[in-house]
Each structure stands twice: as C-alpha cells, then as structure tokens.
Image (cartoon, rainbow, N blue to C red):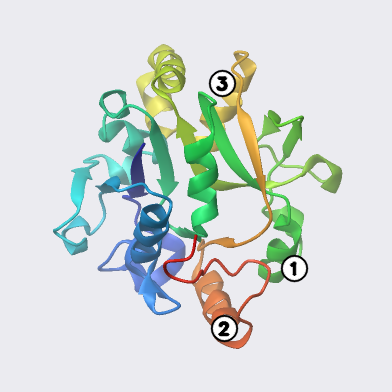
Amino acid sequence: MHAVILAAGCGSRMGRLTRRRPKALLRLGGRTLLQWQLAALAAAGIDEVSVVGGHAAEALPPVLRQVRNPQWLHSGPIASLRAAQPQRLGTVLLVYGDGVFHPDYARALRASSADIAITVDRRWHKLWSLRFADVLSDAETLRMRDGRLLEIGARSHDLAAVEGQFTGLVRFSARGWAQAQALLDELEPAAAQKLDTTGLLARLLRRGAAIETVAMDGRWCEVDSARDLALYRWLAYRCPGWSHDWRWAEGAA
C-alpha cells in the first residue's frame, strides 16, 4: 500500500497560521500534523508515502517523496491525488493532510480487501459537539448498512441521516481507482478539477460502485480551523485519553 498525503491547500480558515506553511506543518501535541501522519502510517506498516504539495510546498521536509499540484489554488483534493498518479502506485491510501489519526485507522484499511473503502467515525457527535454549537451546521449525511456505504456528502437537518463521519482516509485498490478514473474522465475538466473526496464517493455510489465502510470509534481529529487547533491543543494537554485522542504508545502493537 502506498499512502498519498494531500497537503496542497492554503488552509484559509487558519488565518496567519498558514501564511507561510502548509496546514500539515502546524504543530499539535508536540509534533506537526504531518509527523503524526507519517508515524501512524509507519506504525501500521506503511512506509511508501508521497506528499502532494502546493501552497508553501518549499516548507515541506525535503526528505519526503514530494509531488506538486501546480493548480492547487483552483482545484480540490481529488486533483491533488491525481497529481500523484495513483494508477502507477498499486493500492493507494488517500490521507487528508489536515488531520491526525490513530494507527488503527491505517491498519484497518490496509487489512481491507475492498476495492474502495473508507473509515467512518461512529462517535462523531461527541467531537462535533465540542467544535460546533450546532453539529448539523457542519456534519454531512452518511448512511451505511452491513458495512456498505449508502449515502455521503449532503447537508441534512436530521441527525438520523448522519450515522458517522468520513475521517479523511480512503483505500483504493488498482481496480477501485480505475473505477474512479473512469468517472473522472467523463466529467467536464473544470468539474473534475474542483471535485472533493465525498463528491467523488457520492458519484461512485450513484454509478453502483461498492464502497466498504470500516467503522471506528473516535481517536482522530480534523483540523479545519484555528479554533479546532486551539481546542485540540487544550484537550491534548488537559484531557489525555479523551474520546478522540489520536495518540498511542510508541512501539505498541
């Protein structure tokens, strides 16, 4: 499995914190987000990693295998993934560069045999209620049955339509990515360029693709804003072991 970390965006909601660096280089719990991601992947036995840069890419560590998305300012995460040429990498693990996760997330997707699989946080409400006064102002629909994704990515006023939240990790086998690529090839170039991951997954569902859901319970965070970062820093310091604490004992199985 080859992991592709998407770190091209400018993180506009982070304000001055990302003026001269990618969001993946923000520090949380003593490490940068990127260092946490690389450590989690290594703990899961995944040591082939590419990082897709764009905004302030020169700040990324030079030792990494880097790919540039030259259109980062006007494109979405799927365009960044395509810049890494996943069709040449075999089984790919897409990783959003603005989150941290326990190694069990990567282990679960590495162990999956599905062509397309995502990890889903069933305890999402606990995290969202800390981040938002109204959890439905940000949460997206996600429905699943018997380990299969049924719906994703829409807004809803009904909590029953939100059975979990997508955690920013997707497994594509070579055959799974071929399905995604065929769909992208049929879109207008501008639409394909702007497409985000949940949008791609929703379109694949409408075409009848099977997408596996791997249910998880907490132990990850997405850093979407400066407020998120401040909240997680406080919780990591004051409440170790909280429901979404992503950290683990180094060297533990």
Question: Could you give the CA–CA distance between mark 1 and mark 2, rounded to whole angstroms?
Answer: 18 Å
SS state under label 3: helix
245 vs 42: above or below:
below
Residue linked to disc 2:
234
SS state under label 1: loop
Q: In screen coordinates, is 132 left or right of 70?
A: right
- At label 2, counting other C-alpha atoms closer than 10 Å, the crowd grade (few under 14, some 14-19, many 20 or more) is some
For marks 3 and 2 on the same chain, the one whose residue lies earlier in the sequence: 3
SS state under label 2: helix
Q: Which mark is residue 133?
A: 1
For marks 1 and 2 on the same chain, the one whose residue lies earlier in the sequence: 1
115 vs 241: above or below:
above
Q: Position of residue 237 (x, y in %)?
A: 55, 86
Q: Position of residue 241 (x, y in %)?
A: 63, 76
Seen at 47% across and 34% down, the residue is 171
Q: Which mark is residue 239?
A: none
For marks 1 and 3 on the same chain, the one whose residue lies earlier in the sequence: 1
Question: Could you give the CA–CA distance between mark 1 and mark 3, rounded to whole angstroms?
Answer: 32 Å
Q: Indicate the amino acid at tag 2.
A: Trp
Residue linked to disc 3:
204
